[in-house]
Image (cartoon, grey):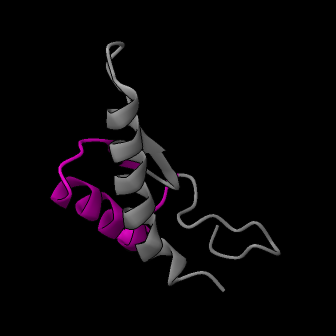
Amino acid sequence: MKNRDTKEPMAPWNATADQMAIMNQVAAKIRELGMYTFVRWSYIFICPPLTITKDEIDEGLAIISEAISIADKHVY
């Protein structure tokens, strides 16, 4: 959320390229850290394999957590 009081999303539904700037930075950071996801609007879509281990889940969550810290800087 960009604004926690009004629940304004980081990028609105059907966002323009300019409105996706922050989420594009988040997506780039996730890729940089070695995880492949689909980021659209304010959502991060993941599809882990059915054979995923707990350590791999923890690694993926750590990557996402680090990446969304970029968006945290834009919360008001």
Instruction: Give the residues in magenta.
Output: 14-39
Question: Which quadrant does the C terminus fall into?
Answer: bottom right
Residue pictured at 39% horizontal, 65% vertical = 66
| Image position of 9 (left or right of 7) | left
Number of marks drawn: 0
Closer to the camera, 11 or 14?
11
Q: Residue furthest right?
A: 5
Which of 61 and 2 lies nearest the eye of the viewer? 61
Question: Which of the 4 quarters of the picture holds residue 9?
Answer: bottom right
Q: Nearer the viewer, residue 54 or 14?
A: 54
* Direction from residue 32 to residue 12 in the image, left or right: right
Identify the residue shown where x is 48% and y is 60%.
15
- The picture places residue 74, in percent across and down from the top left corner, at 53, 83
- Tell me residue 59's x, y (percent): 33, 45
Give left or right: position of 60 versus 75: left
> Could you tell me which residue is drawn at 31 percent across and 19 percent down?
49
x and y percentages locating residue 32 in the rendered image: 17, 60
**Image vertical order of residue 18 relative to residue 63, above or below:** below
Residue reaching furthest to the front: 55
Q: Is residue 17 visible?
A: no
Q: Is residue 63 magenta?
A: no
Residue at image x 50%, y 48%? 43
Question: Residue 1, percent across and down?
Answer: 64, 67
Given the current orientation, which residue lies at the most extreme top position? 50
Q: Is residue 72 visible?
A: yes
> From what the image shows, is residue 30 above or below residue 24?
above
Image quadrant assignment for residue 54: top left
The stretch drawn in magenta includes residue 17 = yes
